[in-house]
Amino acid sequence: MASDKIKQFLNSWKNGVIEIGKVFLEDGDYVKRAEDFLSVHYAFDTEEVLFKPTFTKQKLFRNSHDLALSYFVKGKIEEDNGFALKPWESIDLVELNSIEETSLKVAMGAFKFKPMNQNETTLVAFTFFLIEDGSSFKIKVHHSSPV
């Protein structure tokens, strides 16, 4: 069973993705919001990070801050459409499994993504390897794919 700390982190992550889209719709500084999101949720500032985003085909991995930013807000890579700019109305955690050992924290599960003003949903399986960062976590390895 996942700890409250892992659940809080996942809630923060999904709310952060939704917030980037809201800032985009309001013509705000969504790139700054996405940069803040990456700083809070990913360990790019202090560690190597492996990131396989959900909808990548031509360039599978985004293992740097700049490439991750491109994926979330449509940047340097042609296939990046701005994952967080969809925008998402809701992201629901529908399954969660975890391993929590002294030096290993892993969350594996599924999110159901619902775009704003649409009835369709997309089920996405994810695996996050987490490192401790103060009272929370940051993602060191992120792999996700549509189900």
Image: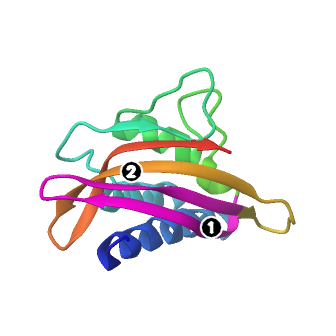
In the rendered structure, the answer to whether residue 79 lies left or right of residue 75 reads right
Label 2: which residue? 128
Query: Is the residue 19 above or below the residue 110 in the image?
Result: below
Kind of residue at badge 1: Ile
* Foreground label between 1 and 2: 2
The structure residue drawn at horizontal position 52% and vertical position 66%, both measured from the top left corner, is 14
The structure residue drawn at horizontal position 37% and vertical position 32%, both measured from the top left corner, is 63
The structure residue drawn at horizontal position 39% and vertical position 50%, both measured from the top left corner, is 128
| In the image, residue 84 lies in the stretch drawn in magenta | no
The quadrant the N terminus occupies is bottom left
Q: Position of residue 46 (x, y in %)?
A: 17, 46
Q: Position of residue 138 (x, y in %)?
A: 28, 57
The CA distance from mark 1 to mark 2 is 16 Å
| In the image, residue 98 lies in the stretch drawn in magenta | yes
Query: Is the residue 99 above or below the residue 2 in the image?
Result: above
Q: Position of residue 36 (x, y in %)?
A: 37, 61
Dominant SS type (magenta): strand
Quarter where residue 10 is shown: bottom left
Label whose residue precedes the other's in the sequence (1 or 2): 1
The structure residue drawn at horizontal position 55% and vertical position 70%, both measured from the top left corner, is 19
In the rendered structure, the answer to whether residue 9 lies left or right of residue 147 reads left
Q: Which residues are magenta?
A: 87-113
Residue 125's label in the rendered image is none
Of residues 145 and 115, the one drawn nearer to the viewer in this rendering: 145
Q: Secondary structure at mark 1?
A: strand
Label 1: which residue? 91
* Local crowd size for mark 1, using a 10 Å CA cut-off: few (<14), some (14–19), many (≥20): many
* Local crowd size for mark 2, using a 10 Å CA cut-off: few (<14), some (14–19), many (≥20): many
Give the residue furthest to the front: 1
Q: Position of residue 132 (x, y in %)?
A: 18, 61
